[in-house]
Image (tube, rainbow, N blue to C red):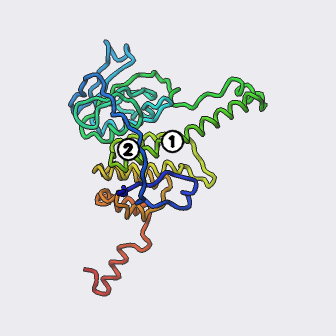
């Protein structure tokens, strides 16, 4: 069977010491990924200015509002994955263009990656994919949560555990809650790796768009306040996922997005710079004017290029 290119493989405990080759011959069964559902026919306003529309008499009288923003403006907002898998606002710039937004507001629908279609915001990965890939203005249908950020918080401790902690005791309530948290954590880790494998399978079939959606989900599931035994602040899963996101964007010609993903990858602790400089999946982004300056900040050449040119010049080889 013909070998497909495989981006960085599923992380394992051994990956910290060595990485398997990217060009591997594999056969993975990809689970079907449903196409994003379209919302009821409503095309985003095609405007270069900020447009806000509330469903009701006033924005204050409704829980749902609609905003159309230029992409450069929309990208200033920051979103995170909620406990329900949706996309929630976690940062709002202090500027008049963003007066309609509040931290905790949830995206209900988003303009498709191209055209005038609108997608229901079924998942965080789909929303981020649509925003990053769209060239025109970005339409967002938002649900106002009135400051409720419970969807972004970790599950509350049980009342029994709280009471025991307050009394300085360790009892059945604390032990039970710790076991539940451990079980949930392990379940989430397995789910995350399954999603990673699914994205790899889609990549192998050159379905880069759907692979991107799932890779974005995997990245968003990075544990908060992570710290490894060797003081790494990002999991191997996150680093490898950001690398593969960069590969997908490079393959689809989204070079700026690819470069940004590589920055996050290396900023999280990825140190295999040779792979970045030689991987065929990143061939397109390596042609990007800002690529060399970016990677040199993380992987400074052993010998400065200017020094090489100077030495060549001394011997008449500086042409």
Query: Does 60 appear above or below 275?
Result: above
In the image: residue 116, left or right of residue 276: left
Residue placed furthest toward the bottom: 315
Give how far across and how far down residue 22 sits, in percent: 42, 59
Q: Earlier in the sequence, mark 1 or mark 2?
A: 1
Residue drawn at 60 percent across, 35 percent down: 184
Residue 59 visible within the image = yes
Residue 260 visible within the image = no
For the C terminus, the quadrant is bottom left
Quarter of the rendering containing residue 44: top left
Q: Which mark is residue 192?
A: 1
Q: Which mark is residue 211?
A: 2
Query: Does 211 appear above or below 318?
Result: above
Q: How far is disc 1 from disc 2 in space, using C-alphas?
A: 14 Å
Give how far across and how far down residue 269 sits, in percent: 50, 55
Residue placed furthest toward the front: 1
Secondary structure under tag 1 reads helix
Residue closer to the observer: 89 or 40: 40
Give how far across and how far down residue 115 sits, in percent: 22, 34
Residue drawn at 57 percent across, 57 percent down: 14
In the image: residue 316, left or right of residue 30: left
For the N terminus, the quadrant is bottom left
Q: Residues within 10 Å of mark 1 (few under 14, many from 20)?
A: many
């Amino acid at each position: 069977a013909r070998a497909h290119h495989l981006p960085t493989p599923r992380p394992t405990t051994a990956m910290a010491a060595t990485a398997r080759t990217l060009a591997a011959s594999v056969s993975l069964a990809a689970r079907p990924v449903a196409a994003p559902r379209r919302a009821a026919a409503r095309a985003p306003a095609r405007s270069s200015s900020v447009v806000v529309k509330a469903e009701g008499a006033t924005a204050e009288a409704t829980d749902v509002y609609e905003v159309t923003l230029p992409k450069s403006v929309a990208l200033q907002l920051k979103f995170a994955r909620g406990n329900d898998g949706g996309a929630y606002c976690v940062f709002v710039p202090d500027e008049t263009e963003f007066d309609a937004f509040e931290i905790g507001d949830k995206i209900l629908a988003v303009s498709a990656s191209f055209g005038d279609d609108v997608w229901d915001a079924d998942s965080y990965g789909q929303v981020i994919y649509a925003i990053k890939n769209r060239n025109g203005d970005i339409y967002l249908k938002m649900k106002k949560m009135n400051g409720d950020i419970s969807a972004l918080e970790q599950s509350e401790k049980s009342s029994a555990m709280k009471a025991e902690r307050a009394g300085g005791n360790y009892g059945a309530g604390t032990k039970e809650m710790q076991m539940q948290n451990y079980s949930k954590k392990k379940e989430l880790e397995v789910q995350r790796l399954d999603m990673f494998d699914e994205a790899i399978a889609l990549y192998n079939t050159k379905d880069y768009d759907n692979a991107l959606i799932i890779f974005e989900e995997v990245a968003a599931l990075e544990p908060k306040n992570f710290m490894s035994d060797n003081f790494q602040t990002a999991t191997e899963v996150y680093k490898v996922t950001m690398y593969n996101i960069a590969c997908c964007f490079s393959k689809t010609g989204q070079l700026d997005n690819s470069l940004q993903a590589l920055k996050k990858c290396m900023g999280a602790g990825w140190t295999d710079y040779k792979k970045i400089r030689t991987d065929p999946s990143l061939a397109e982004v390596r042609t990007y004017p800002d690529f060399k300056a970016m990677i040199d900040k993380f992987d400074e050449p052993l010998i400065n290029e200017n020094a090489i040119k100077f030495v060549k010049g001394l011997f008449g080889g500086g042409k």
